[in-house]
Image (cartoon, helix red, strand yellow):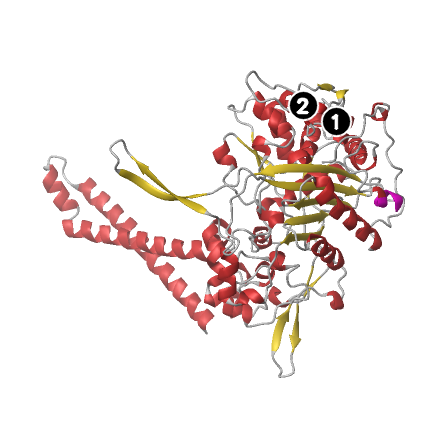
Amino acid sequence: MPALLTLIYVGGFSLIVLLLLISLLRNRRRAAVAAANLPNDLPVEVRRRLGSTSTNRGLRALRWLFILLAVGLVGFHIYWAHYAQELNQKFQELGYKDLRNRRLSESTLRGWILDRSGRLDRALAYYRRDSSGGISREYPMDKAMAHIFGSDRGDPGLERALFGVQSGALPESLEVVKGKTVQNKGNTDIRLTIDRELQQAAVDQLKGKHGAVVILNPQTGEVLALYSEPSYSLKEVEDETTWIRLEANERDRPLVSRALGAYYIPGSTFKTVTMTAAFIAGFQDTEFVCSGGGYYAAPGANVIFDDGGPGEVHGRIGIETAYEVSCNQYFAQMGVKLGAERLKQAAQLLGIGAYDTPVEALRGRKEPELWNASTDAIKRALAPREATIVTGKQVTRYDLALMGYGQGYAGQMTPLQMALAASAIANLDGKLIKPRIEFDRPPEVFKQVVPPQTAEKMRGIMGLVTGGPSGTARGVFAPVKAAGINTGGKTGTAQKVVPLYDPKTGQPKTRHKVEKDNRGNIIREYDETILDEEHPRIDGWFLCIAPLERPQLAMAVIVEGGGYGSRSAAPIAAALVLKARDLGYFNIPNNQKAPQASQRQQKRVAPRRQR
């Protein structure tokens, strides 16, 4: 009956609006006919009175006003009911607080969430009945999956995206009247691509640290593990006091997914992007000199040295050796040679936004279009912040040099984005496959980045980092090599100036500032965050692909304050590769032979300091 009454109301309302329009058109025609039949020699005022009285004109104005108000009201309702969930970001953030939607979603049991095995005993979310008959939602990997599932108080997570009641998911009135059965997806079991054991291994490796791990299958785009530490408990944040306390902790930021929503300076891992740009531009055979005097990108600019300072000299080298030993001078010169436009082209192929100004690059736009998902709600729930670089006309040679080796305007990268940069090289066809977390989704290609032959050459170069005689992660990956697994990788280390925090409250320390004019009058007062410029945080990175012959993993690891990437992030990646081996990820038939090093790759330099 309510659905039928709704249809009657909408039909009647539409009929009234239609009749008003018809009457207005008919009156307009009558007035035109009457005016045409009047003698031409009548005064204008007389003709106006004979054609239409002021009362008639007033009635027509009221009719038009009523029609406009009615159309505006209906349009307002249609926008908020059907389009706001896709177009209005504020509505997306707060829509879940609508009690009507929450009551609808909570009125039925949600489906179970299963890991990639599909086994019920490995479920990631399910219902349990207690001794008193009560039913509760259980999360066996509470903290491990918190940033993916989300809570009812924070950003929309996968739970709300999968089972939340969307306006489009509700049956229309006509369907109800016809008795049509509308499938309710809220109680359908969902199988994810997440491997429960690999996810737990990432949790164990990051325990006690601040950082993130992202593991993808580069051939299919499947997200095998995605974890950010510190995390939080889904059960604990049901208490509002706990939620407020966690939200106020700006030092640890447990509610933020570092894998998707935190920006980092990529350091030497960005050389992977620069190498990709060099191959696309055909500059892969270019040699540069790494000297004790450093590299001056422009007159008056700061000199660029390698990590060891003037004492670290590599001589004239090509891109293979430069990547293996992580030569800053080489990639700084390559950045200048490539120029802004070629860097922009490569960045966009990898999903990195290229903007003309720093202001545009710092907006932190979400990037839902990067995901392969069945609904827009899932894409929004997992949307990472867009990684960005600046390639406008104001970019100088020195800026290009800094970007070439992962500094300056390249400092807006997320762990997911760096995993995607490695994934494009690891893909056998040189394609960047969109990440996906729904197991039954077919793969979708984001962009064709490089030809298959080029991707193979680049995988060989990445293999030098973990297997070459001067590779920056050779020692860490020796046990992996001994286990018969060929890998590729890239270390990275980056300094970042961060605020000083109060150890008790977790809040940034501030100092009160007062600005005065020439007469001593106070212009404004404000609190300034105190930055610890004397002790910048040193973040450690590592990118990894494995096995090198036919990669099934593309990984990014970031450890905040971990120091050199070879000492902090690389051991985590090595442990996760061995775990993946134990789980059977490398048992693939018809493996190709490992790519052979070229003649130029045989040229080696003395071992150097780890990065």
**C-alpha separation, residue under disc 2 versus residue under disc 1:** 11 Å
Label at residue 213: none
Q: Is residue 173 above or below residue 473?
A: below
Q: Give the left or right position of residue 397, taking residue 512 as reference.
A: right
Q: Is residue 389 above or below residue 4?
A: above
Q: Which residue is depicted at the point 84% across and 45% down?
A: 480
Q: Position of residue 20 (x, y in %)?
A: 30, 55
Residue 483 part of the magenta-drawn span: yes
Which segment is the magenta one? Answer: 479-484
Residue under numbered circle 1: 322
Q: Secondary structure at mark 2?
A: helix
Q: Based on the displayed image, in which of its 4 quarters is residue 276 positioned?
A: top right
Residue 228 in sight in this render? yes
Going by the numbered disc 2, the residue's amino acid type is Met
Q: Based on the displayed image, in which of its 4 quarters is residue 522 positioned?
A: top left
Q: Main structural element of the magenta stretch: helix, strand or loop? A: helix
Q: Based on the displayed image, in which of its 4 quarters is residue 189 positioned?
A: bottom right
Q: Tags 2 and 1 in contact by the CB under 8 Å rule?
A: yes
Q: Which residue is depicted at the point 86% across and 34% down?
A: 595
Q: Farthest top residue?
A: 299
Label at residue 334: 2
Q: Position of residue 155 (x, y in %)?
A: 53, 56
Question: Closest to the observer: 525 or 430?
Answer: 525
Look at discs 2 and 1 and give the one toward the viewer. 1
Q: Give the left or right position of residue 224, taking residue 483 as reference.
A: left
Q: State the quadrant of the C terminus.
A: top right
10 Å crowding of disc 1: few (<14), some (14-19), many (20+): many
Residue 184 in sight in this render? no
